[in-house]
Amino acid sequence: MVIPSAYPTIYKPRSHPPNSHHFISLKSLEPSISGPIVFQPKPNPVQSTSPSTSRARDNPIQLKMSPIALITGSNQGIGRATAEALAINHGFHVLITSRNLAAGEAVASSLRAKGHKATAIQLDLTSESSIKAAVAFVEQEFGALDVLINNAGILIDVQKDLSPWELYTRTFTTNVVGPGVLTELLVPLLRKAPSGLPRIIFVTSAMGSLHYATDKSLPWYGIDYKVYDASKAAVNMLMLNFARVLEEGNGKGKVNAVCPGYVNTNLTRFDENGVSVEMGARRVVEVAVAGEEGPNRTFSNASGELPW
Ligand SMILES: NC(=O)c1ccc[n+]([C@@H]2O[C@H](COP(=O)([O-])OP(=O)(O)OC[C@H]3O[C@@H](n4cnc5c(N)ncnc54)[C@H](OP(=O)(O)O)[C@@H]3O)[C@@H](O)[C@H]2O)c1
């Protein structure tokens, strides 16, 4: 069911005029873009801090017991909350991927210290070699994947020192090209999902809704995030196409797009008007753990389906 009224209440910034282009200031985005822009390949192709005991060939029984989920950008924010919920509440072996391996390993080791299964893998979505190395590692160590959560993303439209070329290229490389290529390369492993039901979730945004983009009554109508919005519309189209791809073969698989709502994270300058990361992760986790009767080809948030 389409619930068009659900989103505006979440996205309305309280302390700024509705049409402000600056409710996420330039300064606020500095932490988002302070990571390495150019990938530095490491001599060791296996860029992970995984304990070797997690190897599929060493322990196939353990794999049977723990479905495996790879979450991009899970060193912080919604991705981290999603990974923690999957490991702690649903018994997943989570693959914590991050641009900075040490940041991912901090999350993975804190989960392992509490008795959960987690492995950190370096992954920069703007680097083809990083994507290929991460996929090769998953193949070598696990041989299969149950759930892929394409969570990592950036919103840099407000960074006015970027040239239009840089803004479009960086946004689309991170939000669309990287997730698309990663998903493409992981499909063969997803088809071997030990659970028998591969699932892919694209973390998208209601800002990518074509329907909402034409609705002048919405409080965010005038906010000029055209590049971010376009990247999320493209992500929604990737979702529909990968749903078709998984349908081919044995017809097993669920692919969905989820909007987390307006969440208090680095991306929103830790805006206290946003909901907690746990709340933001709720719908993502719900869809990730859904079984045969779960949704497929949907675009939704915690309140229900969203209009395209
Ligand atoms: N927060 C919201 O209100 C909101 C609303 C709608 C949709 N979303 C979506 O939710 C997702 C998560 O956002 P968030 O709010 O949790 O933001 P966040 O806290 O800034 O987390 C973003 C994550 O993406 C990672 N990332 C950025 N560039 C990357 C790259 N080139 N390669 C790999 N990882 C990269 C970041 O890594 P670093 O730590 O290295 O920067 C970080 O782990 C995004 O797709 C966003 O568009 C968020």
Image: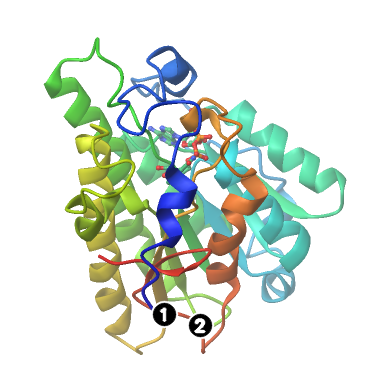
Please provide percent x and percent y for residue 198: 47, 75
Rendered residue at 36%/74% (across/down): 2
Vertical relation: 6 (above or below) 194? above
> On the rendered image, what quadrant is the N terminus found in?
bottom left
From the viewer's side, name the closer residue of 20 and 224. 20
Q: Tell me the residue that label 2 is attached to.
A: 294
Q: Depth-wise, is mark 2 or mark 1 nearer the camera?
A: 2
Mark 2 Cα shell of 10 Å, populated few (<14), some (14-19), many (≥20): few
Vertical relation: 249 (above or below) 162? below
Vertical relation: 67 (above or below) 75? below
Please provide percent x and percent y for residue 84: 70, 51
Mark 2 beta carbon near ligand 1 (under 8 Å) = no
For marks 2 and 1 on the same chain, the one whose residue lies earlier in the sequence: 1
Vertical relation: 245 (above or below) 203? below
Q: Can I make out residue 129 in this image?
A: yes
- Displayed quadrant of residue 167: top left
Horizontal side, residue 74 vs residue 39: left or right? right
| Secondary structure found at label 2 | loop
Q: Tell me the residue that label 1 is attached to.
A: 253
Horizontal side, residue 284 vs residue 254: left or right? right
Mark 1 Cα shell of 10 Å, populated few (<14), some (14-19), many (≥20): many
Q: Amino acid at mark 2?
A: Gly
| Secondary structure found at label 1 | loop
- Displayed quadrant of residue 188: bottom left
Q: Residue furthest right?
A: 114
Please provide percent x and percent y for residue 14: 50, 33
Q: Can I make out residue 136 in this image?
A: no
Colour pattern: rainbow
Q: Amino acid at mark 1?
A: Gly
From the viewer's side, name the closer residue of 171 and 273. 273
